[in-house]
């Protein structure tokens, strides 16, 4: 590994937020030509540290050095000028602008003083090719699925010819094949001397792509080491003060009564003739690659997307004509994939966001009881170990993973009979992931039926009673627990169109 001098260095940086010491005297550096991995539990301070390195936030104390000289980054523009680029954890794109406009936002290519759209389009298409994507550069970003938006975000950083690239959970919405492509690009960048800071909760990923690792806990640096000298156990031990318990082992489903029946649901171009049933107490996984139609199917079931046809029955009652709210009241709730857009109200506190979907349950004699609300919120904050100063903390000031836990809490409080969860562990640390699935398992043992979408093979394999696989908008396979294997799932997820048609009943 290169022993090059540090390209970018944070020296004894401290960051105070109201009520929180997010970083406490941290030293951190990235050299040219290396991938320096940053890991820690939700709320450990990872995003805060890279925000300081990107000029998004300023340290309360301490300073930065670039190429051995002290540097002040008052803004992201200062950072861009120095050659520091960032891929954000929460996507920072403009949904009503096109792909190419987003890529060149604030770094427009000009010719004779005017924006050279032709040149920009050409570069954008070149970047898509490099990333092996066929996204039309004129599409509005808001019309793209989350995974494609993440690709655009990556293109945006690549278009800037950076010397340091900060990546905050860049793969959280990418499929395995896209992650491979991203890793290839990262290796290319490394070879040209770019220094990369890489944040992810996916430990196997870190072991594969990282050269060095630094573990943060509660805003402090725990230890840095060469990846070659450590293993996953080493990392997990340093991440949390407490011992990590692996996710609860699979428990057999009691084979109870059917609660959800879906018949021939159809969304033009997205979901084709999907039928399935769910029994009380079942924990069923839906596996598929990005764009397979899982999110769209879940949205149709929850009522946030219209279907062109099909029937949805909850406990025998038709749901198709009910609104999202009405379905929640009947006991059918969806934890959405995109917590920013669909899950949370940014101007509300943590507590109010958590109780938003279950206000009726927190009313006494028709009046909302703040005490009840706070009690529910506090209970789930403890259960899911949400890192916060309390229910009154503004939701946007929680770390990304803790916001995800808040979204999940919000729907747990609706006391669902059927709970749909779209990528529930996206962005949450390994400990919290285990906690979320423990709660799911407990709900299932109380008779709740749970359908969760996941692109994580291991998650699906270790947790589900049964797995449905989607490919190109259709159900391509259904596997009982005893039939599950990595090969089966992958093969079904990549199935060709002509071989697709399964009714999972
Ligand atoms: N704007 C803010 N105001 C108040 N507190 C904040 C703000 N931004 C972050 N924090 C707090 O700082 C701490 C560190 O947050 P940070 O986002 O850096 O965590 P993280 O390690 O990136 O976690 P995750 O894995 O969940 O993304 C958290 O306790 C968070 O609540
Ligand atoms: Mg973060």
Image (cartoon, rainbow, N blue to C red):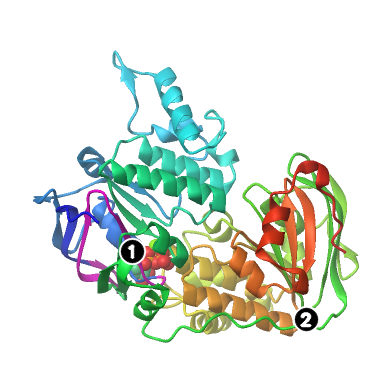
Up-down relation of residue 49 to residue 131 (above or below):
below
Whether residue 151 is situated above or below residue 62 in the rendered picture: above
Q: Which mark is residue 253?
A: 2
Label 2 beta carbon within 8 A of ligand 1: no
Taking the magenta stretch, the answer to whether it contains residue 19 is yes
In percent of width and height, residue 27 lies at 18, 66
Check the picture and name the quadrant holding the N terminus: bottom left
* Numbered mark located on residue 38 in the image: 1
- The magenta stretch spans which residues? 15-42
Q: Residue at x 26, y 49 (%)?
A: 33
Res 379 → quadrant? bottom right
Q: Residues within 10 Å of mark 1 (few under 14, many from 20)?
A: many
Describe the element under mark 2 as helix, strand or loop: loop
Mark toward the start of the polypeptide (2 vs 1): 1
**Relative to 402, does residue 251 appear above or below in the rendering?**
below
Task: Kindly give the residue lying farthest to the right in the view shown.
Answer: 316
Q: Would you say residue 47 is visible in this rendering?
A: yes
Residue 311 lies, in percent from the top left, at 88, 55
Residue depicted at x 33% and y 33%: 106
All told, the count of numbered labels is 2
Residue at image point 42% right, 38% down: 155
């Amino acid at each position: 590994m290169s022993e090059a001098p540090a390209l970018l260095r944070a020296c004894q940086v401290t960051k105070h937020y109201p009520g929180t010491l997010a970083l406490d005297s941290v030293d951190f550096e990235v050299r040219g030509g290396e991938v320096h991995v940053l890991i820690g539990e939700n709320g450990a301070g990872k995003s805060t540290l890279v925000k300081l390195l990107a000029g998004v936030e300023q340290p309360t104390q301490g300073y930065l050095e670039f190429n051995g000289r002290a540097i002040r980054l008052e803004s992201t523009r200062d950072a861009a000028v120095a050659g520091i680029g960032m891929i954000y954890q929460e996507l920072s794109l403009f949904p009503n602008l096109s792909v190419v406009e987003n890529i060149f936002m604030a770094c427009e290519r000009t010719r004779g003083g005017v924006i050279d759209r032709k040149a920009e389009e050409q570069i954008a298409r070149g970047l898509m090719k490099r990333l092996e994507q066929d996204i039309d550069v004129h599409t509005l970003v808001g019309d793209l699925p989350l995974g494609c938006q993440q690709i655009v975000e990556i293109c945006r950083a690549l278009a800037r010819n950076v010397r340091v690239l900060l990546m905050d959970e860049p793969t959280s919405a990418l499929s395995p094949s896209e992650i491979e492509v991203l890793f290839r690009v990262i290796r290319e960048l490394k070879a040209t001397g770019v220094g990369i800071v890489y944040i992810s909760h996916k430990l196997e990923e870190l072991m594969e792509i990282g050269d060095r690792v630094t573990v943060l806990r509660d805003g402090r640096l725990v230890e840095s080491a060469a990846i070659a000298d450590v293993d996953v156990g080493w990392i997990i031990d340093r991440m949390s003060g407490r011992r990590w318990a692996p996710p609860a082992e699979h428990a057999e489903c009691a084979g109870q009564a059917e609660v959800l029946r879906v018949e021939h649901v159809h969304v033009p171009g997205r979901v084709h003739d999907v039928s399935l049933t769910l029994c009380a107490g079942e924990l069923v996984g839906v596996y598929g690659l990005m764009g397979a139609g899982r999110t769209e199917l879940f949205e149709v079931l929850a009522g946030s997307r219209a279907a062109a046809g099909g029937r949805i029955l909850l406990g025998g009652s038709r749901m198709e004509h009910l609104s999202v709210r009405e379905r929640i009241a009947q006991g059918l709730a969806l934890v959405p994939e995109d917590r920013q857009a669909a899950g949370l109200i940014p101007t509300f506190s943590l507590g109010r966001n958590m109780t938003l979907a279950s206000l009726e349950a927190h009313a006494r004699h028709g009046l909302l009881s703040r005490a009840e609300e706070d009690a529910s919120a506090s209970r789930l904050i403890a259960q899911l170990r949400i890192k916060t100063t309390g229910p009154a903390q503004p939701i946007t000031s929680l770390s990304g993973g803790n916001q995800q836990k808040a979204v999940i809490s919000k729907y747990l409080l609706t006391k669902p009979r059927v709970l749909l969860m779209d990528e529930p562990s996206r962005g949450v640390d390994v400990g919290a992931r285990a906690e979320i699935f423990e709660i799911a398992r407990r709900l299932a043992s109380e008779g709740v039926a749970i359908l969760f979408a996941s692109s994580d093979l291991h998650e699906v394999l270790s947790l589900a009673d049964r797995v449905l696989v989607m490919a190109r908008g259709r159900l391509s396979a259904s596997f009982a627990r005893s039939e599950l294997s990595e090969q089966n799932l992958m093969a079904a997820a990549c199935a060709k169109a002509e071989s697709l048609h399964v009714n999972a009943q």
